[in-house]
Every structure is written in C-alpha cells, then in structure tokens.
Image (cartoon, grey):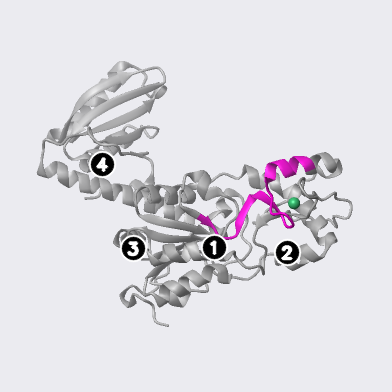
Amino acid sequence: MAPPCAEEAARPGAGPATLGRFVRDHPGLFVLTGAGISTASGIPAYRDADGNWRRKPPLTQQEFTRSEAARKRYWARSFVGWPAISRAAPNAAHDALARLQRDGHIGQVVTQNVDGLHQRAGSERVIDLHGRLDRVVCVECAATLPRAAVQSVMAAANPAFAERDAPVAPDGDADLEVDGAGFDAPGCPRCGGVLKPDVVFFGDGVPPSRVNAALAALGGADAVLVVGSSLMAYSGYRFCERASELGKPIAAVNRGRTRADALLALKIDADCVATLAALALELARGALTARCSLGTIADTVRYQLVLRFPGDAFDDFDEILALETALAERLGELGEVEDRDVGSDECRIALLTVDPVRAFADARTVLERRGLLDASVAVYRPVGARDYTVRPDDPAAGSGGA
Ligand SMILES: [Zn+2]
C-alpha cells in the first residue's frame, strides 16, 4: 500500500523540525506508544531494533491458567521484579506527551505499556491497551486489588524471596531463573480464586471495549503518531492499518524498523526521549513566536522576561548592576530592566520587552558571555497564563527563532 502522503515519504533521520510540522498540521493527534518510550525509565524493551525478541517470549495466558507451576513461577518472578517497576518514574518523553496533550496537540493516548507512566506524567485520556501492572484481578470473581496490597501479602508469605533482586522485564517479571516451586502464590481474598495481574498476556486478546474506544478516538483524529513501538504485536499494528484505510497519515519515532514502515508518512529513526523533548521545546517556542508577532503589531503588549540566578551567582552587588547594564545595552530599544530582586537563595532580574523572542536570545548571549550558565530564563506575558522556561545552556534552545 502506498504511503498516505507521498511527498513526505519516510525519511530516516528527519529531525524534530519535520516532526513539529507534522504535529502542527494535525492537531488532536492519536498517539500510540510502546515499550521504547519507557526504556529510559529503566523498563527494558522486549524486542530489539529489528523487531526480534531480545529475551525469551513472555508468558502466555494459556500457560498461566493451565499450570499451577507456571503461576507460581510467574508470581515469584513478578514479586522480585515489582519494586523496580513501582519505583520507575516518567521520563522526558512521557512529560513531553503530557504537555502536548495539555496544549491541544494530542487528543487520545493509547499505550501498549502496562507501567502507568503516562498517567503519572500527567497525561489524561489514556487507554491502557494491555492493562495495568499496578492492579491485580481475580479470574473467578473479577475482584480487583491494588498490586501493592498483593505484594505485601506475598512478602509476608514468602520471606525467603524478599531479599532477591534481579533485572526486570517490561511486564514486571524478573529475569530470574527460579522454578517457583517454593513460592506461595497469592489467592483471592474474597473467593480464594486464582489472581493474575490485570494485564493482557502475550497471545491473549485485548478486551473489545478497549479496542473499540481506541478505534473511536482514531476515527476522530487527523493523524497518528507512533512512539517507541516496533508494532510487531497486532494489538498496536491494527491502529496503523485502520488509519491507513481511512487515509490518515502516520508518523513514527522509533529506533529501528517497524511493522508499519510501508504505511508511514514520516519516520524518525531516533531516540524517542531526545526527539520528543526537542519537539516539545520547538512547539513551545512556536507559540512564543506567534505571541511575538502580536506584540509587534500592537506594541502596547509587553512581555516580562525574568532571569533567575542561584543566590551565589554574584560576588557583589556591582556585578549585578554590570549585568543589568550589559542587558540594557544589548536589548536597546527592545526592552528595559523593570525590576531586580536580590536574595540569598535567588536573584531575579525582570525585563519588559515587546519582542520576547529577540530579547530571549539577546539575554542568553549576555549570560553566556558572563559564564552565567546556571540561570533560568522565563518569559511571561503580563496578562496570560502560559510560561516558558528554558535553561540558557540548553543546546536545543537555539538562537531565538523568528
Ligand atoms: Zn475472587
């Protein structure tokens, strides 16, 4: 099948600027994420860059329900692996997607991951296609329990396993060679039935209600963005297949090939954390540029640029005055020093300007020349809610755009 956007055929190595255009051109994106987005949070991917199994394939639902030995082995490994999963924190890619969703660039997030990191980063409207590892469900009576409570029960029943530590896998079981025969697997506190993590095992179907909710969201989206998935599992690939049938363009950020490569309008073969962090910054700067135009048209709109320094950044007050003079010279008619506040923890210099993008770039130049790389620069619109904070030593901050 031909790519939906022939003029934007897959271009490996295309940078965030191209991705930024894709995102701006298609507001309300349908975003599909896979294991690759969580590897930087310490949760490893199952497949390598060619889509091959990096480890032995995960446990199947059939094995789990049919074999008590398999269940004991699963829970023993899961018991050891859970602490690392529960400690994992969202990374800059999760943060970037949460921000893009808040700013209206993303409608629905659908994830193949079971780690809950999108929600912890602040994303709303997330469909956990394969369930959540922080929940446990009884296969007889369907009671659900928090995973943390089940962990406590297992810890009390299995003191010999409490000291074990091992590398973890994406579904939370540990890479641990253990037969599990000596492990006391948990039972349902209500009916005594078999407990399983509330996740879809390999080879098991995703509940139709989840698939339908995700397909409905896809129907309302202009385009699809895949992040950190090789799409080898049909549960994720099906959304690309459907998007292609509907003529919706698909972009993917993933190291290595994906099963949907032939369907992609845009392919970014790169690390998804660095790519999404740069994308979020670029989109924020785009918003800044738009407001700058507003300020230029109606010069009564002024922006406040606040430079913050650690309290020990200056040896004496004269240094601050010298910096203010340098800033005022550099800014010229673009702005003026409005206020200063010198504290023991933090020093602030506030500038008023009609052109925050130019002023931002000029202030960075002055700060860099003076070696003040620990400063943060934030631009505030005097009336308006959004702030943008960029460290002047951030290479992605560029030279001021516009
Ligand atoms: Zn039960």
Give the Cα separation between the discs numbered 2 and 3: 38 Å
Q: Nearer the viewer, residue 162 or 324?
A: 162
> Magenta stretch: residue 108 in it?
no
Q: Which amino acid type corresponds to the residue marked 1 in the rendered image?
A: Ser
Q: Which amino acid type corresponds to the residue marked 4 in the rendered image?
A: Ala
Q: Nearer the viewer, residue 78 or 258?
A: 78
Numbered range of the magenta stretch: 127-153
Q: Does dot 3 land on a helix, a strand or a loop?
A: helix
Q: Nearer the viewer, residue 321 or 260?
A: 260
Tag on residue 361? 4
**Above or below, 11 relative to 402:** below
Tag on residue 59? 2
Looking at the image, tell me whether mark 4 or mark 2 is earlier in sequence order: 2
Please indicate whether residue 231 sits to the left or right of residue 6 in the image: right
- For label 3, the crowd category at 10 Å Cα-Cα, with few meaning under 14, some 14 to 19 and many 20 or more, is many
- The image position of residue 157, as x and y in percent, is 84, 42
